[in-house]
Amino acid sequence: MSVIEPILNRKSTKIFKKTEPISKEAVETIIEAAIQAPNHHITEPWKFFVMQGENMQQFYDAAMEFQKNRDISEEEFQRMKVKMISKTMVAPTVILAVYSKNKNKTRGKYEEDILAVGAAIQNMLVQATSMGIDSIWKTGPVYNATEVKSALGIEEDEEVVGAIFFGENDNAKELLRKRTDKREKTIWL
């Protein structure tokens, strides 16, 4: 398979089948693709936290603690409780891609390192697609909440750049991906 095929075929999956987590070997292959991402000065500014099975409940509980600690009404909390299930328990495997400053490589710059983690995530998504595994990259304040970071062992100075959900698409309709034609976004000088 050429590289362009999984890039063109990758789509964000919002509804996953309730299946077993993806295999350890598949996770390791996806992370191997991630760590091949370009990173200036070879800072390797990332860590990957893999959640499956019971770990997913720990993540959900910490996310709910975050919601509980916000200044919201009981009604809003109950609404968020339902929403958090769909956000945190949606797929059988989740990998948190975390920016972690490499303390041994002092030449790294935040702007470059955070982009490197984004490139690592893109590699993960493309690799998963090439393996027939569906995925979605999610972000939001809950992933960097003190409650979540503490529960999962993410250090205070580390930053979750994305939660990548993996599994099998359970959406009955065909996923469509609309993109603006490249000619409208390209400026030749």
Image (cartoon, rainbow, N blue to C red):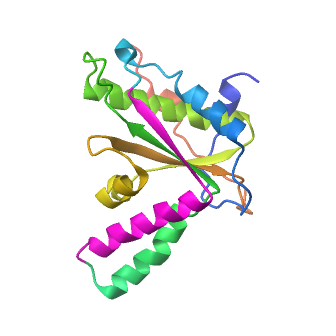
Residue 21 in picture, x, y percent from top left: 69, 52
Q: Is residue 77 left or right of residue 94?
A: left
Quadrant in the rendering for residue 32: top right
Closest to the observer, 107 or 38: 107
Q: Is residue 165 left or right of residue 155?
A: right
How many numbered marks does the figure carry? 0
Closest to the observer, 37 or 56: 56
Q: Which residues are magenta?
A: 45-71
Residue 117 in picture, x, y percent from top left: 42, 32
Residue 149 in picture, x, y percent from top left: 36, 52
Quadrant in the rendering for residue 123: top right
Quadrant in the rendering for residue 179: top right
Residue at 27% in and 72% down: 69
One can see residue 9 in this view: no
Quadrant holding the N terminus: top right
Residue 69 part of the magenta segment: yes
Residue 89 in picture, x, y percent from top left: 56, 64
Residue at 41% in and 75% down: 80
Residue at 37% in and 46% down: 154
Q: Is residue 179 left or right of residue 53?
A: left
Residue at 61% in and 47% down: 135
Where is 129 relative to 144, above or below? above
One can see residue 43 in this view: yes
Residue 50 part of the magenta segment: yes
Where is 111 relative to 85, above or below? above
Quadrant holding the C terminus: top left
Where is 84 relative to 16, above or below? below
